[in-house]
Image (spheres, rainbow, N blue to C red):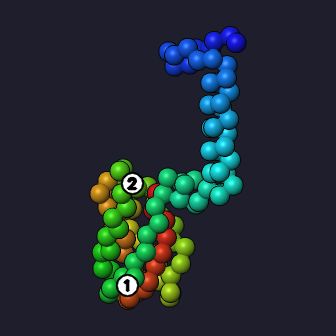
Amino acid sequence: MRPTQIGGEIKSFLEVSNAINDLSRELSIVLSNGLTFADNLDAVSFSIGDTGAAGTANKIDHGLGRNPTSFIITNQDGAGSIYTSGGNLGFTSGAVVFCSENNLSIEGYIF
């Protein structure tokens, strides 16, 4: 068998073939189980059980490791708007959202 160089190492054709098969199996598992909405957006889900009084700051500890750029609300249990302060969503350590109504429960994604 003819050797092949990969990443500075000489590998046999069989080793390269096996590595490709392993990667193919792993990719198949990921695609078969489906990518989540958050996977596609580099996002994390969040929920706030009670937003408190209207205009209360609600902190979201997102763990993104960067400043978030936006959010999407996927569920809320009443009428009201979820908003940021002057378009500033947050920081590397967390984000802050506000609600225009009292005591809503909200769920969403931050990315």
Query: In the figure, 44 relative to 5: above or below?
Result: below
Q: Is residue 64 left or right of residue 30?
A: left
Residue 5 spot, x, y in % from top left: 58, 14
Front residue of 80/8: it is: 8
Residue 84 spot, x, y in % from top left: 38, 68
Res. 50 mark: 1
Query: In the figure, 111 relative to 55: above or below?
Result: above
- Residue at 59% over, 17% down: 11
- Residue at 43% over, 69% down: 46
The amino acid at mark 2 is Leu
Res. 68 mark: none
Badges 2 and 1: C-beta atoms under 8 Å apart? no
Res. 64 mark: 2
Front residue of 39/107: it is: 39
The amino acid at mark 1 is Asp
- Residue at 36% over, 75% down: 98
Asked whether residue 2 appears in the rendered view, the answer is yes
